Amino acid sequence: QLQLVESGGGLVQPGGSLRLSCAASRFNLDDYAIGWFRQAPGKEREGVSCITAHGWSQDYAEPVKGRFTISRDNNGDTVLLQMNSLIPEDTAVYYCAAVGGPAQGICTLLDQGRYHYWGQGTQVTVSS
């Protein structure tokens, strides 16, 4: 069973940066499409960014385009979300999710049900 663990969250001032990591022990995440999602208090969970297996393609939600970058490390066991120019509206719990098999080549931010595996989340707070 694939288990995802997010890390890298924390408190940062507006304009600052954070790098989130999504890792899985004993599994190579290169074979999975990975999505990053976030949920702010009182709001529905929304897609942030995704990357297909092997990094063939990526996608970003409009609010984060130009500020966030999703990537895979060279070992294939971690997916990173580099978040720059953070604003208070980015405050949320951030989750990574994975799907393998035939769906590994599809990167979607809208169909959350496509993802079979979810992490526990990491809190990101942007505040002065």
Image: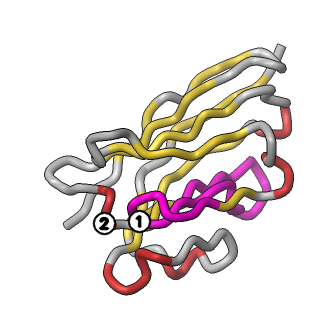
Q: Image check: 51 left or right of 47? A: left
Q: Position of residue 84 (x, y in %)?
A: 73, 28
CA separation in Å, label 1 and label 2: 5 Å
Question: Colour scheme of this structure image?
Answer: secondary structure
Q: Which kind of residue does numbered mark 1 sit on? A: Ala
Residue neighbourhood size for the residue with mark 2, other residues' Cα within 10 Å, grouped as few (<14), some (14–19), many (≥20): many
Pick the front one: 30 or 114: 30
Above-or-below relation of 25 to 20: below
Pick the front one: 86 or 66: 66
Pick the front one: 106 or 57: 57
Pick the front one: 72 or 40: 72
Q: Position of residue 48 (x, y in %)?
A: 68, 55
Report helix, strand or loop for mark 2.
Answer: helix
Q: Position of residue 71 (x, y in %)?
A: 51, 45
- Residue tagged 2: 31
Q: Which kind of residue does numbered mark 2 sit on? A: Asp
Q: Are marks 1 and 2 in contact (CB under 8 Å)?
A: yes
Residue neighbourhood size for the residue with mark 1, other residues' Cα within 10 Å, grouped as few (<14), some (14–19), many (≥20): many
Residue appearing at x 77%, y 37% in the figure: 67
Residue 53's disc number: 1
Above-or-below relation of 46 to 91: below
User: Is the N terminus in the top left, top right, bottom left or bottom right quadrant?
Assistant: bottom left
Residue appearing at x 83%, y 13% in the figure: 128
Name the outermost residue toward the front: 56
For the record, the magenta segment spans: 35-58
Counting residues from the start of the chain, the first of labels 1 and 2 encountered is 2
Report helix, strand or loop for mark 1.
Answer: helix
Q: Image check: 94 left or right of 104? A: right
Residue appearing at x 57%, y 54% in the figure: 36
Residue appearing at x 30%, y 48% in the figure: 76
